[in-house]
Image (tube, rainbow, N blue to C red):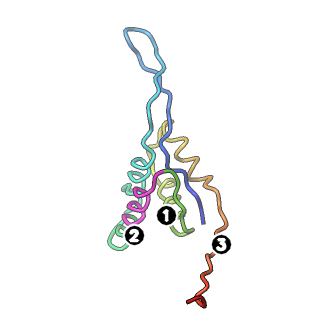
Amino acid sequence: MRKLNVENYINEIKVNENGATVTKEIEYEFKDSLIFIMFNRELQLAGKSLLEQNKLAEKILAVDKEIILEEAEYNKIKQAVETFKGCTRNEVQLVDRVLNCPEIDVEEKKTDFSKN
């Protein structure tokens, strides 16, 4: 299992205002950007793989800060990030979060059904 941080982050960009270079902070929409990458043309999604990718995208949209991913789900996201051509410096943190997504141990919750 993997735990992926899907919170937005801040990027600093330099812009020209009235002839002067000014640094501005912009919020990077992590979930929207990740989902855009997950449906990129290079993946050549069709049929079942498209539906599976969409199910994963819906799961990502439903969480606030973090998502717990099964290894197969993580591998789909990782493949999308590694396949996408067109990343800029704005995506450095997104790519880093995905490629260095920590593994976590999950214990199965045991329910005692003998108590009735």
Q: Which mark is residue 76?
A: 1
Local SS, label 2: helix
| Residue segment shown in magenta | 54-64
Quick check: is 57 in the magenta stretch? yes
Coordinates of residue 51 in the picture (x, y in percent)? 35, 69
Please tell me which residue is depicted at 48% across the width and 20% down the height of the picture: 23
Give how far across and how far down residue 114 sits, in percent. Answer: 60, 91
| Mark 1 to mark 3 CA distance (whole Å) | 23 Å
Q: Amino acid at mark 3?
A: Glu
Q: Residue at x 37, y 57 (%)?
A: 39
Q: Vertical placement of 79 versus 12: above or below?
A: below
Magenta region's main secondary structure?
helix
Q: For mark 1, does the 10 Å Cα neighbourhood hold few (<14), some (14 to 19), or many (20 or more) residues?
A: some
User: Which of disc 2 and disc 1 is earlier in sequence?
Assistant: 2
Q: Mark 1 vs mark 3: which is more N-terminal?
A: 1
Q: Are marks 1 and 2 in contact (CB under 8 Å)?
A: yes
**Residue under the image location 40 percent in, 56 percent down:** 61
Tell which tag, 3 or 2, sits nearer the viewer.
3
| Contact? badges 3 and 2 (CB < 8 Å) | no
Crowd tier of the residue under label 2, counting other residues whose Cα lies within 10 Å: few below 14, some 14–19, many 20 or above: some
Count of numbered labels shown in the rendering:
3
- Tell me the amino acid under the disc marked 2: Glu
- The residue under label 3 is 107
Instruction: Give the secondary structure at mark 1.
Output: helix
Tell me which corner region of the image, top left, top right, bottom left or bottom right, holds residue 74.
bottom right
